[in-house]
Image (cartoon, rainbow, N blue to C red):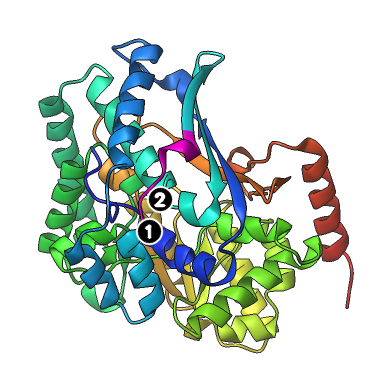
Amino acid sequence: MIYSLLDTDFYKLTMMQVVLHQYASAWVRYAFKWRNWDEMHLTVSLQDFKRQVDAEIDHLCELRFTDDEVNYLSGIRFFKPDFIEYLRLFQLNRKYINTGIDNDRLHVNIEGPWLNTILYEIPVLALISELYSSLHGVDDATWQKEGRRALKDNVRFLLKATLEEQRFKFAEFGTRRRASYAWQQEVLRYLVDKCEDRLVGTSNPHLAMKLGIRPIGTMAHEFLQAHQQLGPRLVDSQKVALQCWADEYRGELGIALSDTMGFDKFLKDFDRFFALLFNGCRQDSGDPYEWTEKLIAHYQKMRIDPRTKSAIYSDGLTLKTAVDIFTRFHDQIETSFGIGTHLTNDCGFVAPQVVIKMVECNHKPVAKISDSQDKGMCEDEEFLDYLNYVIREDINTEY
């Protein structure tokens, strides 16, 4: 189901370059969570499903970047020659990933050098989603028919609700929870054909290369999480991560992810220096309206015109929600939207809500504290309590 290492999310590659240059010896562990497992329906046993997942992972670990793929990446201005040459040699190592069944749920554990494991997450999530799509009891022709109907309805709504001159922009972010690669490609081709002026790109660099559109992505939660155990004081870890990113990309890829330690803590760290340095921020949990109002107010407090900055939204969006947010805020701040599951798995059945998150760095716990209660993740309650304490104390302290 995965036939290319480039079939991933672009931000995995942008983070991987930073890891190569600055944290090549870091050791990490990732954990898998199937958030809506109780809503799933498999036509095979969980043991059979696991065996098929294992077979797909075996195949994934045989892949290498092709010359065409490496040459494509070498043409992207912020990828450096040493990183490109590293990718020529790269191959996922099967010993760093294992699966199991625990309490009648699928278990996936990834542990090893950060540099050697960072590319596991997206293809593993994608192959689990694709396997489920083929084994949930609805034949391909039926869900594809429903998917095409939903896609046409979505695009019809978008073209009617937004005018070209309004500058509504969105990207396709659906690789990890797609119904299939072929379906994701069909969706993207249709979007390019029908609303190219509104589509800014895709998070999937393989499809970006194939279709001649822009690959989109900067950083993920794991990048900020890892810094909780990479040396700085815990209270400063987010600021150090942002500085590390700026040092690597020198003004490129300037979108800061805002919800790894909660948005209030992010705003405390995102002072005038970072607010000027970064082009904008990405919202991935919490209430998008409240988030935008607080972000605009923060820029104004920093004496920065929010209309010169960007707000990126990627939290389970539908096109209708995106248009509503755009309509409310587009004259106050530049907006753009990453839409995933509701484009690539809107096919008439409940899509798997599967995630893989970093839970340890250098054999110590890390945490994601989300602005949506169900999206946080940490395996060490004592560390989580301490991190929450540190965040509360910092937010309530004036400097």
Residue at 52% x, 32% y: name it. Answer: 33
Viewport quadrant of the N terminus: top left
Dot 2, how many residues are within 10 Å of its Cα: few (below 14), some (14-19), or many (20+)? some
Left or right for 392, reference 263? right
- The residue tagged 2 is 317
- Residue annotated with mark 1: 338
Q: Looking at the image, is mark 2 or mark 1 earlier in the sequence?
A: 2
Res. 88 mark: none
The image shows residue 134 at horizontal and vertical percentages of 23, 25
Q: Residue at x 69, y 56 (%)?
A: 261
Q: Is residue 38 left or right of residue 50?
A: right
In the picture provided, is 84 more to the left or to the right than 286?
left
The image shows a total of numbered marks equal to 2
Q: Contact, CB < 8 Å: mark 2 with mark 1?
A: yes
Residue at 34% x, 27% y: name it: 53
Q: Quadrant of the C terminus?
A: bottom right
Q: Quadrant of residue 392?
A: bottom right
Mark 1 element type: strand
Q: Is residue 396 left or right of 65 when viewed as pictured?
A: right
Name the kind of residue labelled 2 in the image: Leu
Q: Is residue 168 above or below residue 387?
A: below
